[in-house]
């Protein structure tokens, strides 16, 4: 399994890179994917990040996981990317793993992907989770979908992804190694 973290201008650096860092500590194959046509992507706090690859250079497989970070205007730029939205729709239709944090879960809500599912989103955006059973938990997991609230929940979000991909014991080991109380 590979985990693809999508980067576009305005992405929230901590949300995206915490996922990359913690999953790589768990020896999960994580690939950052640029949606801007070049390797360098500018984060919301004007931190340039070099992505591992460009969107069109990847062959996405059935066992892969998609990660949509938030940030403003990052999550809105994700939603504007037609190729990414087609991929998200394909993954959703086939019950493949999709995760989103901060404002990005609203994308899933507007696309009908959260119908009947428990989900969470950045505070004040609950109405964007169309069809979802909204929770204010740090992380919500329902079937193939994992959502989280924002920058302050990036560590528990990442640990939930590790638990989903590997197991709870590995998530606990990573949590302990970064001195985070799980």
Image (cartoon, rainbow, N blue to C red):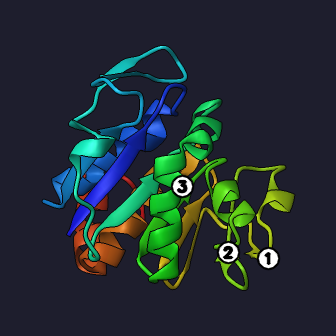
In the rendered structure, the answer to whether residue 99 lies left or right of residue 132 reads: left
Measured as percent of width and height from the top left, residue 179 is found at: 32, 50
- Residue 114 bears which disc, if any? 2
Are discs 2 and 1 less than 8 Å apart at CB?
A: yes
Please say whether residue 56 is visible from this viewpoint. Answer: yes
Q: Residue at x 20, y 70 (%)?
A: 1
Find residue 131 and name its label: 1
Instruction: Give above or below for 26 relative to 172.
Output: above
Residue 72, given in percent of the width and then of the height, sits at 64, 31
- Secondary-structure class at tag 3: helix
At x 57% / y 64%, what residue is drawn? Answer: 147
Task: Name the residue nearer the viewer: 49 or 136.
Answer: 49
What is the C-alpha distance between the residues marked 3 and 2?
15 Å
SS at mark 1 in the image: loop
**How far apart are labels 3 and 1 at the CA level?**
18 Å
**N-terminal of the two: label 3 or label 1?**
3
The quadrant holding residue 131 is bottom right
Q: Are marks 3 and 1 in contact (CB under 8 Å)?
A: no
The residue sitting at 64% across, 30% down in the picture is: 73
| Residue for point 22% across, 44% down | 57
Residue 179 visible to the viewer: no
* Count of number-bearing discs: 3
């Amino acid at each position: 399994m590979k985990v693809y973290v999508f980067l576009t201008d305005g992405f929230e650096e901590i949300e995206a890179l915490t996922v990359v860092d913690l999953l790589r500590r768990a020896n999960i194959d994580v690939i950052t994917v640029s949606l801007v046509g070049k390797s360098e992507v500018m984060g919301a706090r004007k931190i340039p990040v070099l992505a591992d690859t460009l969107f069109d250079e990847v062959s996405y497989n059935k066992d892969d996981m998609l990660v949509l970070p938030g940030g403003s205007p990052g999550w809105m730029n994700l939603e504007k990317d037609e190729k990414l939205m087609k991929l998200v729709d394909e993954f959703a239709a086939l019950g493949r793993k999709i995760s989103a944090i901060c404002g990005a879960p609203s994308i899933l809500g507007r696309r009908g992907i959260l119908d009947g599912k428990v989900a969470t989103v950045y505070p004040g955006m609950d109405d964007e989770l169309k069809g979802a059973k909204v929770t204010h938990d740090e992380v919500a997991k329902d079937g193939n979908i994992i959502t989280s609230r924002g920058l302050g929940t990036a560590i528990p979000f990442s640990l939930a992804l590790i638990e989903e991909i590997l197991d709870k014991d590995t998530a606990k080991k990573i949590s302990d190694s970064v001195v985070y109380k799980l």
